[in-house]
Amino acid sequence: MLIDTHAHLNAIQYDEDLIEVITRAKDEGVSHIVVVGFDRQTIIRAIELAETYDFIYATVGWHPVDAIDMTDEDLSWIEELCSHPKVVALGEMGLDYYWDKSPKEIQKEVFRKQIALAKKVKLPIVIHNREATNDIIEILREEQASEVGGIMHCFTGSLEVAEQCMDMNFYISFGGPVTFKNAKKPKEVAKEIPLDKLLIETDCPYLTPHPYRGKRNEPSYVKFIAEQIAELKGISYEEICQKTSDNAKRLFDIK
């Protein structure tokens, strides 16, 4: 069985055929899906999906691109939601220096507040990193995020950065880019990540893996990521499925 640890089934791209998308995932052996909430609208929808389907879980957090919009009221609301039995992590949170909607200092402040909240409610965190690696590592260390650990979501960094993150109690999660034919670095890193620190995800509807690159992504495609990593590591597809599912259940406390 497979677990998609990061999906956006709460996105408008699934408004027309969500049931069919979920059915295809189950048919392909996806046992659990974690739907990520990152602002008011997507959090509400993630919770709704988790309450509707027993195999869907939710995360709640605030995306760095929209950090400028987060209020103290939003943070208090997120804290309340952390007691929901289907909420398994805080996030996605982090830093994004590609888009310029939210100033860097505001992003950092919101990131630190969410780490502090995660430590308070004792939930792991899901990290979004775009062109901000050094600052992310620094903040995770300063805020002692290793107390809760979590996921480096859709990791595309170096092995050195991955090792620093793993030392801080974080799993390394790979998505569609590891299947791209020209993705030399993600393939090299995925090959080296220990099995007990490895997770897989789709980040759907984005970052669709080969051979469907360029089309809408969906949880059933997580199998292509598992197949690629199994090939890179020279082990069976079944072992990758088993190890990554065990890791996800351990991290998210899924019984």
Image (cartoon, rainbow, N blue to C red):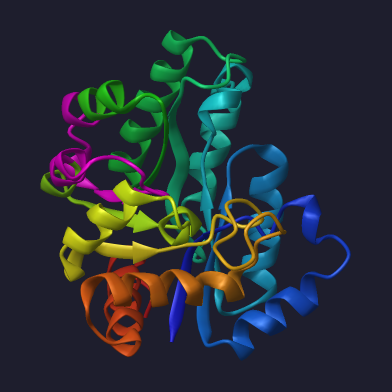
Give above or below for 63 relative to 16.
above
Residue at 89% over, 65% down? 16
Give x and y (percent) for residue 54.
59, 80
193 inside magenta stretch: no
For the record, the magenta segment spans 140-164
Q: Residue at x 50, y 83 (%)?
A: 31
Picture layout, residue 243 above or below residue 7: below
Residue 215 in percent (x, y) is at 71, 58
In depth, the one of 215 and 199 nearer the eye is: 215
Rendering quarter of residue 211: bottom right
Q: In the displayed image of the protein, which residue is found farthest to the front? A: 182
Residue at the extreme right of the image, as rendered: 16
| Residue at horizontal 39 percent and vertical 71 percent from the top | 228
For residue 182, above or below residue 24: above
Q: Is residue 28 left or right of residue 16?
A: left
Quadrant housing the C terminus: bottom left
Name the image quarter holding residue 73: top right
Occupied quadrant, residue 172: bottom left
In the image, is 52 to the left or to the right of 167? right
* Viewer-side residue, 76 vs 33: 33
* Image coordinates for residue 87, horizontal then vertical, percent: 49, 59
Magenta span includes 161: yes
* Residue 123 can be seen in this image: no
Give how far across and how far down residue 247 sits, in percent. 28, 71
Whether residue 49 is visible to the viewer of this picture, yes or no, is: yes
Residue occupying image coordinates x 70% and y 55%: 10
Side (left or right) of 99 relative to 231: right
Position of the N terminus by quadrant: bottom left
